[in-house]
Image (tube, rainbow, N blue to C red):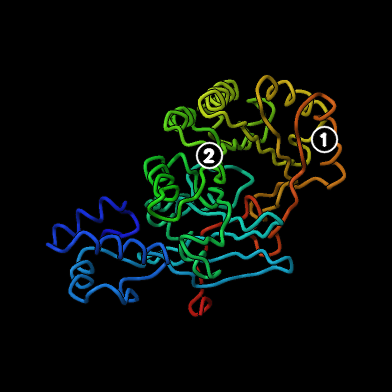
Amino acid sequence: MKILQDLSLSQLEEVIASLNEPKYRAKQIYENIYLGKSLEEMTNVPKNIKESLEKDFLSEPIKIIKTLEDEEGTKKFLYSLFDGNIIEGVLMKYKYGNTLCVSTQVGCRMGCKFCASSLNGIVRNLSAGEILGQVLCVNRLLGGTAKKREITNLVLMGSGEPLDNFHEVTKFLQLVTSKDGINFSARNISLSTCGIVPNIKKLAEIGLPIILTISLHAPNDNIRKTIMPIANKYSIKEIISASRNYFEKTGRRVIFEYALISGVNDSFECAKELATVVKGFPTHVNLIPLNEVKERGLKTVSRKNAEKFCEALKNMGVSASVRRTIGENIEGACGQLRNKVLKEGEAR
């Protein structure tokens, strides 16, 4: 089954033309899609057109089936996909607006030792329309429209490795930044990758100035290999070279994420080595006291020790900060999103 949200306006116009319907109907349908409406809800679209489209297309490929909220207003959404799979996403409220964290795969194949998303491996990639659907249904839930969005920032940091689903993720980026649709600024979108070097290079060539965030988490290859299997394929040197190229192509500084794990990568020697690695072009190190995942057995550091590590980096000339942890008590913090099988009736 095909998904309407996968289509650009021009592609939808071709579909409508094949039904021998006037071109303006495509625009009507497209506007309804970006309001988060299903075909059934499109009251200004003739019944015969909707029935024809329903033969080949899904118009509601993703639904919010459960919402968890913490005391700070952070919300974790459980989404049901058309094939019965479940993914998660997180809405975070900041002074500058609402940031939505979206998933790009059901599960993840990367196997990072500190992350819950790959505990059960990967089930499948999400299509561009399924990624977009997360944005559209949450925007609608908040009372937003395409012209007056209630979501101001997007981060591709949910379950899955975005650059492992390169074709659909880049198609999503084109759709979500299109003026025909919800018209997100590329500068308000962040993509986090564990470091698939060839696809970082391909992303740079596309020319969309999104923020590239590298999940580095170690100052050298030896430590990185113990917590991130991808390190056996791509070295830190290769990742830094690709990151430097990304900056040169887009003009955007690169963010390096570094989850501080007690006894693994949190020593002063690690800070010194990390400073040497990331200096030389515009970068920022985002330090994250590890959000513990019980199945992984790794331990976090205290906030005080995280601040000491940060201060050491700053003293060595590195731009760095310690991220405020939000959503941890609803398993919505960084590294905690997972693909869970809901018990019967739990989502009702």
Mark 1 surroundings: few (<14), some (14-19) or many (≥20) residues within 10 A: many
Residue 142, disc: none
Q: Does the residue at mark 2 contact the one at mark 1 (Cβ under 8 Å)?
A: no
Quadrant in the picture for the N terminus: bottom left
| Residue drawn at (21%, 63%) of the image | 56
271 on left or right of 58: right
The quarter holding residue 165 reads top left
- The one nearer the camera, 236 or 70, is 70
Give residue 29's quadrant in the image: bottom left
Q: Which residue is mark 1?
A: 309
Viewed as shown, does residue 139 lie left or right of 15? right
Residue tagged by mark 2? 210
Disc 1 marks which amino acid? Phe
Question: On the rendered structure, is 109 left or right of 243?
Answer: left
Label 2, residues with CA under 10 Å away: few <14, some 14-19, many ≥20: many
Closest to the camera, between mark 2 and mark 1, is 2
Number of numbered discs overlaid on the protein picture: 2
Q: Position of residue 306 (x, y in %)?
A: 82, 41
Residue 243 rendering spot, x and y as whole percentages: 56, 27
Q: Nearer the viewer, residue 340 or 183?
A: 183
Q: Which residue occupies 52% across, 70% down?
A: 141
- How far apart in space, not on screen, are marks 2 and 1 (Cα)? 28 Å
Whether residue 206 is situated above or below residue 181 in the rendered picture:
above
Give the structural element (helix, strand or loop) at label 2.
Answer: loop
Secondary structure of residue under mark 1: helix
Relative image position of residue 175 (x, y in whole percent): 39, 49
For the residue marked with disc 2, what is the amino acid?
Answer: Ile
Pinpoint residue 274: horizontal percent, then vertical percent: 72, 26
Q: Earlier in the sequence, mark 2 or mark 1?
A: 2
